[in-house]
Each structure stands twice: as C-alpha cells, then as structure tokens.
Amino acid sequence: MAEKLIGRLRWLNTLVAMLIGAILLTCALYVLADIILRKVGSSLGGTDEISGYVMAIVTSWGMGFALLELSHVRIDILRGRVGALGKSVFDLFAMAALSITITVIAIKCWPVLERSIANSSRANTPLETPLWIVQLPWFAGWAWFAIVAWLTLIAALLLILKGNFEAGAAAIGTFSDEESLQ
C-alpha cells in the first residue's frame, strides 16, 4: 500500500512537472517575443511582472516533484556513518521537519490570499493584476507540497515499520556521493 501511494504521488507530480514545464516554456516564449518586439520599437509589456508570477507559481508546484525525486538538499554528515535503521531514523526526522515547515508555510500563505480576495487587491503595476489570480495557484502549490510531504512521510514510516529500509530510503532518503556521480 505504501509503495503504491508513493508511486501514485510520483505519477501525479510527474504530470505537474510536465505542466509547469509547459508554463515555463510559454513564459520564455512570451519574454522572447517581447525582446524581439523591443528591437523594432514595440513591446508586449509586463514581461517582468508576468515572469515573476510564473516563477512563484511553478516553484511552489515544483517542490512536490523535487521531493519525490530526492532533489531537496540535505546535509547528512551523520547519516552515512550509521546502519539502515539509523539512516531511517535520520530520514524520518528530516522528512517530519520538512513536512512541518511546509505546512506552516502553506498555512501562512492562506491569509495573504484571503486578504487579497477581501480587499480586491491589485498589483501596483501598469497591468494592475488582481492579486488573487496569481496567489490562488501559488497557495495551491504550497498546499499540494504539504500534502505530498505528509503522505510521503506516512508511506515511508509504514515501510520502515515493516522493516523495509530500502524502500523507505528510496522514498525519503538521499543519494550518496557515489550515486549522485553516476
């Protein structure tokens, strides 16, 4: 069950990663078009604002994918010096700390969105973008990351409690220096 859950989360986050890749590509093409138009004396305008919004949104959504691909940076000076059980304890501790931190971030993002909706806030820029349009997918990305982190932690805990340390490490561990060089 736990391995199936991690597999489904990986599949969903792969879809998310492809979608945000397409969004980034579209944004890059928009910026490129604006640069070309500037050379002939025109401009689409707002490329800096739009690209900033896109970066905030795709970053929040990309974190879940990075988590399941073991791409988040960790300092494991002690992890390499202990056995499988010790590594699992370090991995669970790191994952719990990450899950708690991301949950706090997601919770703190909500009032920002809520205030923008309540005040009908707009960006103080020429585009005057209604901020909720940008903040809703940004908040949803952080909430998704928190959900993925907790589900991954629970699945890894179940695997480790069953004594399946390898599968637990595959879910929430790190790559050793030798693995990352290959």
Image (cartoon, rainbow, N blue to C red):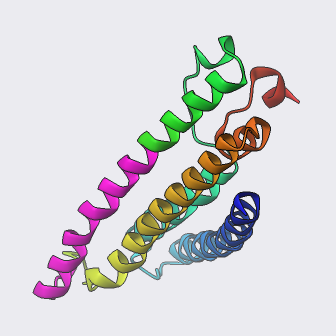
The quadrant of the image that shows the N terminus is bottom right
**Could you tell me residue 24's position as x and y percent?**
61, 69
Magenta residue check for 25: no
Q: Quadrant of the C terminus?
A: top right
Residue 16, x across and y down, in percent = 64, 72
**In this rendering, position of residue 6 left or right of residue 112:** right
Residue 91 image position (x, y, % from top left): 58, 34
The secondary structure that dominates the magenta segment is helix
Does 112 appear in magenta?
yes
Q: Is residue 77 visible?
A: yes
Q: Is residue 122 above or below residue 94?
A: below
Locate residue 124 relative to residue 67 in the image: left or right.
left
Q: Which residues are magenta?
A: 98-122
- Residue at 67% of width from left, 36% of height from top? 173
Left or right: where 116 falls relative to 161: left
Name the residue rendered at 66%, 14% in the picture.
82
- What residue do we see at 71% from left, 44% from top? 162
Residue in view at x 74 percent, y 69 percent? 11
Q: Quadrant of residue 37?
A: bottom right
Q: Nearer the viewer, residue 93 or 101?
A: 93
The picture places residue 140, in percent across and down from the top left corner, at 42, 74
